[in-house]
Amino acid sequence: MILPTLSFQLALRYPSFRQELLRVLRANPYVGREALSSQMEKLIVGPFQATQIPTLIIIDALDECRGKEPTSTLLSVFSHYMDKIPLIKFFITACSEPQIDQLRSLLPITEVFNLSEVPHPSVERDIRLFFETKLSDIARTQSDVSMEDWPSTHHINVLSKKAGGLFIYASTVIKFIASQHYSPDKRLELIINLPNTFHEGRLHDPIYSQILEQAVNNVDVDNEDFHSCLRIVLGAISLVFSPLSVKTLSDLLRISDISTTLYPLNSLLLIPTDEAAPVHILHKSLFDFLTDPVQCGDKWFFVDISACHTELLLSCLSLMKEKLKRNICNLDDYTLLSEIRDLPARQEHYIGDALKYACYFWANHLMEVSSSSTEEVKKAVDNFFETCFLYWIEVLCLTGNLSAGVHALGNVQQWYILVSGNQKNYKNLYS
């Protein structure tokens, strides 16, 4: 979705670009589903060539694309079309040097700026200033902290050293200390007393472990239900294919107190006050920590990726089995969708975001399920096709996303072949 998203943002910014883009979309409303090269040519290059707009496009954290292949394809597309839009400059950031090197090899005019080559004293000076400013702000807004002696020079020195040049460490620490309903000076002492957290360019486990342990410090250590809920919610936020709101997560996972579970983790997660807005993890290093059995040795927090995808898949199938039905939006017979003026309102009322997500992405989760859950998953998928298939197609049609069904069926077929090792064992799901 990167190129459709980029063209949409450019259309909001530049009226002349918007007019050119509208011409493209009127001629081909489904251009966003074409190959990346076609999207680039029609959604980006064509409007720029017609308008001659000079601008800078920033693409941040390219290394966080799922898998290496999409990133390589995107960079190849950029390199192929870059000379056709000479007035446009791209600013691309990534933690993975091979990706940047690939772009440089594809496009000789690329300039590379390596942040690891910035003198360390300069980086530490910036982080120190950040700590001084933010902690002083906390001291002014928290009545139980004296501005005269907090933070001390010792505090700033230790925090700056612990950061090891990582701004994400500094940002995470400040969010942790500033959390409401906690004493900032006690939380600062917790961080000061932790072992060093910077190791080989990564935010290491003590800081995340400390924050997670603080989130559950009032919970019985043997409360399996709470810890299981926390683990499922953290895994879902990390692994869903489209970010979901607290309400949608609650509906999908059938967990009613997600807000209460997530509240102590606001230093690790972006939790909007608007319950309809999506929840995000603040940095990919949290995902790396939660899914690494070496770093995250605590069984209460470790997220098994395959097991979590299985949980999400079964939640999707269960929700669809419960909610899907014939004529779900209560439409009159022989009605054309183009004639239904309140279709968006009906979708929101009768379908909802959780069921939409389940219908769109259940087969994506299926592809991530390991063979250890094969029998349970096969049974659930078979039941879905026996009881919900036509109603699922109806929802995809109502929401204008029938192509998701085509991809889903392909994924199901591929998964059955992978787990059985024999195409003959794949059930004829189309019959």
Image: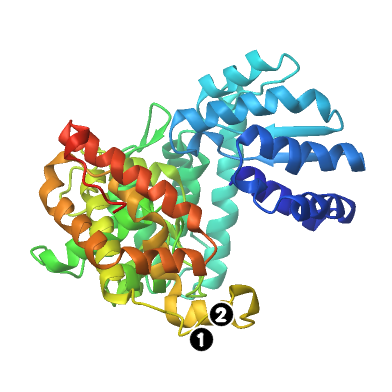
Q: Is residue 59 left or right of residue 181?
A: right
Query: Which label belongs to residue 332?
Result: 1
How many marks the image carries: the answer is 2
- In the rendered view, tell whether residue 123 sits above or below residue 110: below
Q: Residue at x 60, y 31 (%)?
A: 74
Labels 2 and 1 touching (C-beta < 8 A) = yes
> Taking the image as drawn, is residue 192 in sight?
no
Q: Is residue 381 left or right of residue 12?
A: left
Residue 328 location, x and y as percent? 41, 79
Q: Mark number for residue 246?
A: none
Q: Amino acid at mark 1?
A: Asp
Task: Please give the name of the residue rendered at 44% of the width and 68% of the height, measured from the top-left corner.
Answer: 395
Residue depicted at 12% across the width and 53% down the height:
376
User: Quick one: 139 or 171, which is closer to the camera?
Assistant: 171
In the structure shown, which secondary structural element does the residue marked by tag 1 occupy? loop
Residue 268: horizontal and vertical position, in percent?
41, 56
Residue 291, given in percent of the width and then of the height, sits at 28, 42
Q: Amino acid at mark 2?
A: Thr
Q: Give the SS element for disc 2.
A: loop
Front-most of residues 137 and 95: 95
x, y percent for residue 420: 16, 36
Whole-number angstrom distance, CA of label 2 to CA of label 1 = 6 Å
Q: What is the quadrant of the C terminus in the image? A: bottom left
Mark 1 neighbour density, 10 Å: few (under 14) some (14–19) many (20 or more): few
Of the numbered discs in the image, which one, if any, rests on residue 335? 2
